[in-house]
Every structure is written in C-alpha cells, then in structure tokens.
Image (spheres, rainbow, N blue to C red):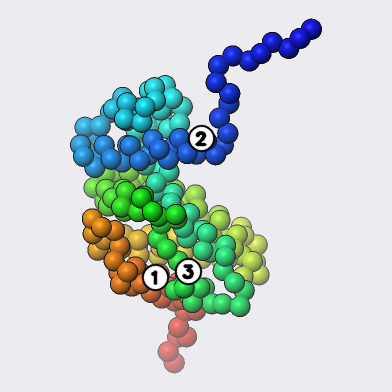
Amino acid sequence: MAERPRRGRPPASDRQKQQQRLDISRHAVALFREHGVAATSGEQIARAAGISERTLWRCFRSKEACVEPLLSKSIDAFQAVLRSWPPELDLAEHLRAAYTPVLDSGEDIEAVLAVIRMTHDEPALRAAYLVLRERAEPAFAEVLADRMGMPADSLEVRMQAAATSAALREATDDLVATATADGIPPAVLQEHREHVADALRRLTHPPAPSV
C-alpha cells in the first residue's frame, strides 16, 4: 500500500528553531525597551514576530523567558573563548587577546546590553539571567577540570566554575553601565577584557599569604 503524503509544514530543524527563538527574542526585547515588561503582552510579541500566540508559548514558557536567546549570546561568548583556551597560555592572557562580551555581536550587541541593563530593574528578567549563568557553570567546569586535573564534579572544580561565572557577571554588569547607544567603545571593551582577565587571574593564582 502506497504511503500517504504528509500534510502540513515539514518539521523545523534545530537550527530553524534556534533562529526562530532568536527572532522572537529580538522583537520581545524591542517591545520591552519601548513599553516596559509589564506593559508588553505575549500577544504583542507574537504579532511583532509574525507568529501565532500558540507558537510563542511553544517556544517560551513566559514572556520574560523570551529574552533568553539574546542573553545567551553573552554567556556563549565566554564559553567559546574558554573552549579555545590554548594549553600553553595562561587563561588571563588568553582572555586579554580573544574575549568578546557578546558572541557574533553584530546587530545584537546593543540589544544584549539593553537586556542585561533591564535585569537590574526587572526581577523576572534578572531571574532568567541568573538561571542561564548557573546552567553555564557545568561547561566552565568541564574545561577547568581538564586544566586542574580533577573530575568536573569535584567540589574544587565546581567552586572554581561558580567563582568564574560570578566574576564574569560582575564584569559584564560593569560594562553595561559604561556602554553607549552606539555600542561599546574600543577602549571600554579593552578595559572590560582587562577586568575579566585580572579577576580570573586572582581566582586561579591567589596571592600567597603574608608571613
């Protein structure tokens, strides 16, 4: 018996789903910036993104969660540079040369910085931001474990990963406070790299106690 042809749209690939989530995130952030989070509805986000509300809620559990794809660009940037850490270099030196605060920044850099700025005043957005950072810690731990010669689930490695995440969050918050509508001036970006590198140098090479 011949197989009946499928009806409807073909299933979206993972790449297409990720792109759709990012597109929705861009529209949501634009609306949050213009109207505020409380005054923006899921219906407005769906309309701006050209999708149904049903599709919106399939992609995100809440309107606040719509910021996650853009926020992830900041966290993914650090993960990418951490994974490319050459064995012959100190982490601080590698960060000074290679780190950027937003992955594939381009058109999204101001939107990412705007979301992080909004997390200071919007508890629901702050919660989403902190959850994403916490979820990233196992990836940090994986790389650090290899360098430290310890299991990734050991207490020492997990504490190092948590401290690394905290240092990055504080440095990023500081960067957001100095960024302008035109993005990040090169001098400010370099200073940000220096802050992150110095903070992680202190974590990985604590000073010897004074005698």
**Three-letter residue code for mark 2:** Lys
Q: Which residue is drawn at 45% across and 83% down?
A: 207
Q: Residue at x 62, y 74 (%)?
A: 87
**Pair 1/3: label in front:** 3
**Three-letter residue code for mark 3:** Ala
In this view, which residue lies farthest toward the right? 1
Judged from the image, the secondary structure of the residue bearing numbered disc 2 is helix
**Residue 123 image point, x, y percent:** 29, 44
In this view, which residue lies farthest toward the top? 1
First along the sequence among labels 1 and 2:
2
Q: Nearer the viewer, residue 70 or 154?
A: 70
**Residue 78 image point, x, y percent:** 47, 60
Q: Nearer the viewer, residue 62 or 205?
A: 62
Circle 1 residue: 193
Is residue 42 in view? no
- Residue 17 is labelled as 2
**Residue 96 image point, x, y percent:** 44, 74
Which quadrant of the view contains residue 30? top left
- Residue 103 is labelled as none
Judged from the image, the secondary structure of the residue bearing numbered disc 1 is helix
First along the sequence among labels 3 and 2:
2
Q: Which residue is drawn at 29% across and 66% down?
A: 185
Image quarter hosting the N terminus: top right
The relative height of residue 194 versus residue 78 in the rendered view (above or below) is below
Q: Count the numbered circles shown.
A: 3
Circle 3 residue: 98
**Residue 18 image point, x, y percent:** 50, 39
Residues marked 1 and 2 touching at CB (< 8 Å) = no
Q: Distance between the residues labelled 1 and 3?
A: 9 Å
How crowded pointer 1 is (Cα within 10 Å; few <14, some 14-19, many 20+) is rated as many
How crowded pointer 2 is (Cα within 10 Å; few <14, some 14-19, many 20+) is rated as few
**Three-letter residue code for mark 1:** Arg
